[in-house]
Amino acid sequence: MSKNAPRTATPGPSERMPSPGPIDSVATSDAITDVAGIDVGHFTDPRRPTGCTVLIARAGAVAGVDVRGAAPGTRETDLLHPSNLVERVHAILLAGGSAWGLDAAGGVMRWLEEHGIGLPVHYGLVPIVPAAVLFDLPVGDARIRPDAEAGYRACVAAGKQAPAQGNVGAGAGALVGKLFGIDRAMKGGIGSAAVTVDGVTVGALVACNALGDVVDPDNGRVLAGARGTDGVTLLDIRRAILAGEHPQPLLAGTNTTLAVVATDAVLSKAQAHRLAQVGHDGLARAINPVHTMSDGDTVFALGTGASGKPAQMMVLATLAAEVTARATVRAVLAARGVTLGGSHWPAHRDLFGEGAGVAAR
């Protein structure tokens, strides 16, 4: 095992957050694993807050991707364009560690091959594993980052149970609200949500490491983000910029929100691409500012087809944006504050208490 190889898997606390609001029909556990054909596993490194998260489609899934941030770190995304050859993927990997974290995809491939999952070619199986990373290097020892062993262990941990949320997996080292300095940021994390309408389920999983604030989509109230100079009040980045306050200079690519939208509807590759695009609508409802020059915001979409029902794209698009926004909010509501090396990044619950939540509709 390499010097930086993870030693033990730590799943972290499983947070079941209240729904941000009612909907006609809510999926069983309100998480992306409600989508038939999707397993999720986290690996959280015990040595510093970092890790990776894998979504496995054992039978394969039609996939699409849309990158809106200007500083992405990705792998195998060109493959997903509707005009390109390969139709189905076998897993999606989200990881911390910046570009180093892309190494974790090799471990996912190894686990899939061992379990007979992949694209059959004359010489064996080639698992198709698109991946994207976020920048969490300021939180602890930057020399520790997800590698192939981390990706493999995330696969070992994968299952159909609702995934843990908050400081786990790809969200373990995530921060939000860094536009006025990382010392005034707050803890981000990972969250999930799902809805079912007319027998079709759409779910999302979001690792939120945004430059901007995370806001309640219903009323615009800031839930987590840049803090004022007192360290306990929320600045509200949008209002601060409109009032003429100047953000600090930023290193490009030091942020990024990653999301996966999945459905059990039958999708074409072009429809999966469109579903990834509208997933960004959900990010825009819950993050402000979003898609900046210093973010690598990336949304993947998966269609397992397990329901056997054809896509009704107007309905799917509405649900995709909804669950992506909800999952983004849950990422910060489930997060817990972190103190390392003299730096402290509080979470929403530290400033507002347990169960402060979001407005009901």
Image (cartoon, helix red, strand yellow):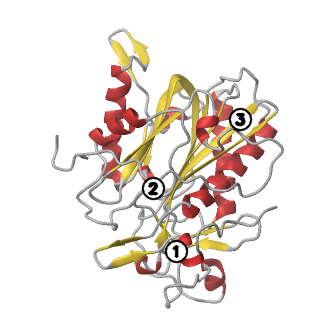
Badge 1 marks a residue whose secondary structure is helix
Asked if 154 appears above or below 327 in the picture, the reply is above
Taking the image as shown, residue 223 lies to the left or right of residue 140, namely right
Asked if 76 appears above or below 191 in the picture, the reply is above
Residues at circles 1 and 3 in contact by the CB criterion of under 8 Å: no
- The residue under label 1 is 350
Q: Residue at x 49, y 81 (%)?
A: 180
Cα distance in 3D space between marks 3 and 2: 24 Å
Q: Quadrant of the C terminus?
A: bottom right
Amino acid type of the residue that numbered disc 3 sits on in the rendered structure: Thr
Kindly identify which numbered label has been placed on residue 249: none
Position in image of residue 178 (x %, y %): 48, 74
Position in image of residue 241 (x %, y %): 61, 83
Look at discs 1 and 2 and give the one toward the viewer. 1
Amino acid type of the residue that numbered disc 2 sits on in the rendered structure: Gly
Cα distance in 3D space between marks 1 and 2: 18 Å
Viewer can see residue 87: no
Work out whether mark 1 precedes mark 3 in sequence or the reverse, and give the earlier one.
Answer: 3
Q: Residue at x 52, y 52 (%)?
A: 165
Q: Residue at x 69, y 54 (%)?
A: 281
- The residue under label 3 is 201
Amino acid type of the residue that numbered disc 1 sits on in the rendered structure: Asp
Cα distance in 3D space between marks 1 and 3: 33 Å
Binning the other alpha carbons within 10 Å of mark 2 as few (below 14), some (14 to 19) or many (20 upward) gives many
Badge 3 marks a residue whose secondary structure is strand
Binning the other alpha carbons within 10 Å of mark 3 as few (below 14), some (14 to 19) or many (20 upward) gives many
Residues at circles 3 and 2 in contact by the CB criterion of under 8 Å: no
- The residue under label 2 is 171
Badge 2 marks a residue whose secondary structure is helix
Asked if 253 appears above or below 99 in the picture, the reply is below
Position in image of residue 329 (x %, y %): 62, 60
Work out whether mark 3 precedes mark 2 in sequence or the reverse, and give the earlier one.
Answer: 2
